[in-house]
Amino acid sequence: MSSTLAHTAIIGAAAGAAAALLVNALTKPPTKRNRPSLEPVKATKAGPAGGHYSQAMKNGGEVFISGLLPVAPDGTKNMGPIEDQVKVVLNNLGAILKESGSSPEKLISVRVYLANFSHENWAAFNKLYNEFVGEHKPARAVVPVPELHHGFLVEVEAIAAL
């Protein structure tokens, strides 16, 4: 057998083995080893989830926090001014971060929805948010929306490291 033919045979065998491994990995059901370790978070010191979802889900080294509205732990909806609503939402965020084993300093990304967007509402939110996160500056998006569920003025969702 010539050396070129031998090299071609070796490369062909290696490619076939790699293809077999890929097909096996893609068609095998997930095992405990390669399945996400999803764990719901339920913080009693935060507003309850209002539907078929968890307040947050932990997976690996991160926690994914659902959209938080200004609802107190006892289920009372805060329909007050923007400052009052933001305080409730940030208290809920802090409680869920703590329950999950994280903190505001470990926030990775925050998405904020503000209804009735105005300079005053933006300034009120930003002041309280800055106090909440301190010197830490996670990635953030602020999305102006025409309205939120139940007529609330603010909703916040986040991702944090554990």
Image (cartoon, grey):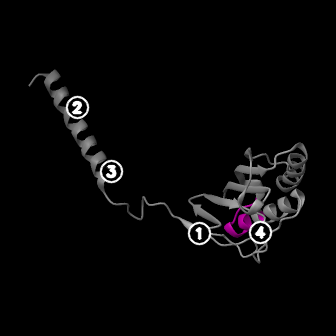
Contact (Cβ within 8 Å) of mark 2 with mark 1: no
Q: Which of marks 3 and 4 is in front?
A: 4
The answer to which quarter of the image holds residue 16 is top left
Which disc is residue 40 wearing?
1
Three-letter amino acid code of the residue under disc 4: Val
Three-letter amino acid code of the residue under disc 2: Ile
Contact (Cβ within 8 Å) of mark 1 with mark 3: no
The picture places residue 1, in percent across and down from the top left corner, at 8, 25
Looking at the image, tell me whether mark 3 or mark 2 is earlier in sequence order: 2
Cα separation, mark 3 vs mark 4, equals: 43 Å
Which secondary structure, mark 1?
strand
Looking at the image, tell me whether mark 3 or mark 4 is earlier in sequence order: 3
Q: Nearer the viewer, mark 4 or mark 1?
A: 4
Cα separation, mark 2 vs mark 4, equals: 62 Å
**112 or 44: nearer the viewer:** 112
Which disc is residue 62 wearing?
none
Q: Is residue 128 left or right of residue 95?
A: right
Looking at the image, tell me whether mark 4 or mark 1 is earlier in sequence order: 1
Which disc is residue 26 wearing?
3
Residue under the image location 69 percent in, 55 percent down: 158
Q: Name the residue under label 2.
A: 11
Looking at the image, tell me whether mark 2 or mark 4 is earlier in sequence order: 2
Cα separation, mark 3 vs mark 2, equals: 23 Å
Q: Quick one: label 4, few (<14), some, or many (20+) residues within 10 Å? A: many
Q: Quick one: label 3, few (<14), some, or many (20+) residues within 10 Å? A: few
The picture places residue 39, in percent across and down from the top left corner, at 56, 68
> Which quadrant does the C terminus fall into?
bottom right
Q: Name the residue under label 4.
A: 71
Which residues are drawn in magenta? 94-103
The answer to which quarter of the image holds residue 50 is bottom right
Total label count?
4
